[in-house]
Image (cartoon, rainbow, N blue to C red):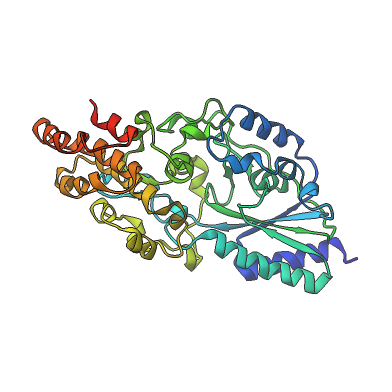
Amino acid sequence: MPKTSAAKDHILKAAQDAGFDVVRITGPEGLEPNAAYFKQFLDQGHHGDMAWMTQKVDRRSNPKVLWSEVKSIILLGMNYGPEEDPAEILKLKDRGNISVYARGKDYHDVVKKKLKQVARDLHRTYQADVKVFVDTAPVMEKPLAAKSGLGWQGKHTNLVSREFGSWLFLGSIFTTLELGADLPETTHCGSCRKCLDICPTNAFPAPNKLDARRCISYLTIEYKGHIAREFRNPMGNRIYGCDDCLAVCPWNKYAKILSEPAYMPRPELSFPALGDLVELDDTAFRHVFSGSPIKRIGRDYFIRNVLIAIGNSHETALIPKVTKHLVDPAAVIRAMAVWALYNLCDTAQWRSLKAVHLAAETDENVRQEWQR
């Protein structure tokens, strides 16, 4: 068995060589309080349509259920701090606001590749068994990261770091190697509640509690349906995710601008024109968002989001482009095209379009958008 300090030093060096910005270590035990909160979150239905969260709850609650042989968990973070304030693009009503994390390459792919590099080194050097996880596995990454001292969970439930503010991608390596655990980080939010107060849709019923059903990130990424009217105006030009509660955190004054080339914002995803995005067909959508996490939601739900942003834009020049979507095969697109036109058209234009399209519409959700 290697000396703990030597092994930790080796892991730190390997992680830095792979491109990780911060590394901490914790044990698999001690997540009972987090498991209780997670159960309450599910019992209250705050997970919305994310049924996958209800699966393998025992594995999320206890890493040893996920893998009985795990002795230590290595938490690794990669900085993706933006160069500009993400709130600035909210002022550009004719542009689509894409969450900072999705403007470059898909972090799942980037982080997992680097995790495997560190894990291979760990296995080769110490003959330890290893498993790597990035986001999609049933792992409570944020509580584990807090327990390892990598950061703490703010009142918005996201991880906050002294060194990197809100901007860390997380990955974990489970190993059979016994390593000394680092000290957990304490909470440094104090009386601040900026992240709670800035939420456009009031998604936080209380500090440290999130109702995902009201969260714009959930609505624009996870939710596969007709977004309720009460959320459409607050969405503004947010077409994929929302950074409001992250960007407003005072700890971002210590954040660093990203250095990993893979996370550099692609020009076409930084300030994309809504008028260009709304014209994407399925082939063009797949091409534009190749290698991006945005590709996963599919063209139909992405265009749904873009149409809501156009409806909030006051850009009447986009009316012809929106009108084309009144005959789109996807009802979720037709419905939001109707809503957008209701916001953009004058009374005469609206009545003219309604006279042509309402009688032929068979989907009830779309008909309800017309009937007002």
Q: Is residue 263 left or right of residue 348?
A: right
Name the foreground residue: 57 vs 6.
57
Outermost residue on the bottom side: it is 124
Residue 325 image offset from top left, x and y in percent: 24, 47
- Place of residue 297 in the rendered image (x, y in percent of width and height, measured from the top left): 44, 51
Q: Is residue 349 above or below residue 301?
A: above
Q: Does 7 appear above or below 135?
A: below
Q: 237 and 84: which one is in front?
A: 237
Location of the N terminus by quadrant is bottom right
* Residue under the point 31% across and 55% down: 271
Residue shown at the point (35%, 57%) measured from the top left: 270
- Location of residue 14 with respect to 179 vertically, above or below: below
Q: Residue furthest right?
A: 1
Where is residue 31 drawn, in percent x and y? 75, 40
Residue 78, located in which quarter of the rendered image?
bottom right
Please give the name of the residue rendered at 49% of the width and 40% of the height, measured from the top-left corner.
Answer: 249
Quarter containing the C terminus: top left
Numbered circles on residues, count:
0
Percent x, y of residue 168? 56, 53
Q: Quadrant of residue 90?
A: top left
> Within the image, what quadrant is residue 201 found in?
top left
| 95 with respect to 39 (left or right) | left
